[in-house]
Image (cartoon, rainbow, N blue to C red):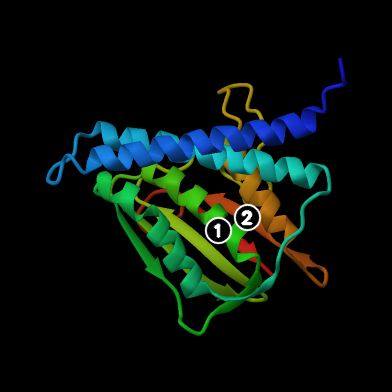
Amino acid sequence: MAAINFSELLVSSVDDIKNSLATLHALISQLKNNYPDKKPPEFKQLEFETNRMNNSLMQLLTLHKIDLSHFSLTIDEHSAADILEDVAAQQSSLLSLGSIQLLTQSQSDLFCYCDATHIINALCTLVNNAQHYCLSKVLLSASQEGDYVVFCLEDDGTGYPEDLLRSDQKVPGLEDTTTGNTHLGLVYVETIAQLHVKADQKGFITTDNNSQFGGARFKLYLP
């Protein structure tokens, strides 16, 4: 028997699963059309879980490519406001199911140099997570802080647990042995941030519970 290339097997398997999830997501959308008025609450959970699985697979594949040095960013100048609009458009369906309000805030003349595709994916991951823990409101904003463009996510939930509060630009490792949580989303977002480098500065993240709404606040810094 020929030796198994587990790297190729992983990539192929992830692609197969993502195709199945795309089919499942399309079926869920079709079923939602049968409820033009009030939709059963189970649709929210179905959409959340399919999005979470799809995002996790995408993150695993990206981290795998980074680990093999088969990954590079496509850096260009992008409007921060346009990035926020793309995130809001991608998350609107799921947020509406949970009656959650997503607010966006950015100056029209704020631009950043980044890989927009991966920054949008990172922000969608954060919004997807926040909508699961917030009460009714999420604010996604972009601003200039010194040499960095900062994408900030704030919600009105109960805030991060103590083990996820990070002001030292670090996040937990891939596995929290006390909870079994891999923190994959945070690891992915931090990794994408750190790949954005300008001169001697690189991207980083911080987490705290200083949201203006009383909940969690996540900040993604890009040089």
Label total for image: 2
| Residue 136 appears left or right of 77 | left
Residue farthest to the top, as pictured = 1
Query: What residue is shown at x 82% (from left), y 23% (from top)?
Result: 4
Percent across and percent down for residue 49 are 42, 34
Q: Quadrant of residue 74?
A: bottom right
Q: Residue type at mark 2?
A: Ile
Check the picture and name the quadrant holding the N terminus. top right
Query: What residue is shown at x 49% (from left), y 33% (from top)?
Result: 20
Q: Nearer the viewer, residue 199 or 70?
A: 70
Q: Secondary structure at mark 1?
A: strand
For residue 173, above or below residue 215: above
| Residue 19 appears left or right of 146 | left
Tag 1 residue: 219
Label 2 to label 1: alpha-carbon separation: 6 Å
Nearer-N-terminus badge (2/1): 2
| Residue 136 appears left or right of 71 | left
Q: Quadrant of residue 193?
A: bottom right
Instruction: Kindly indicate whether the residue at mark 1 contacts the one at mark 2 (C-beta within 8 angstroms).
Output: yes
| Residue 180 appears left or right of 100 | right
Residue farthest to the left, as pictured = 37
- The label on residue 205 is 2
Percent across and percent down for residue 145 are 59, 73
Q: Nearer the viewer, residue 211 or 173?
A: 173
For residue 120, above or below residue 54: below
Residue farthest to the front, as pictured = 1
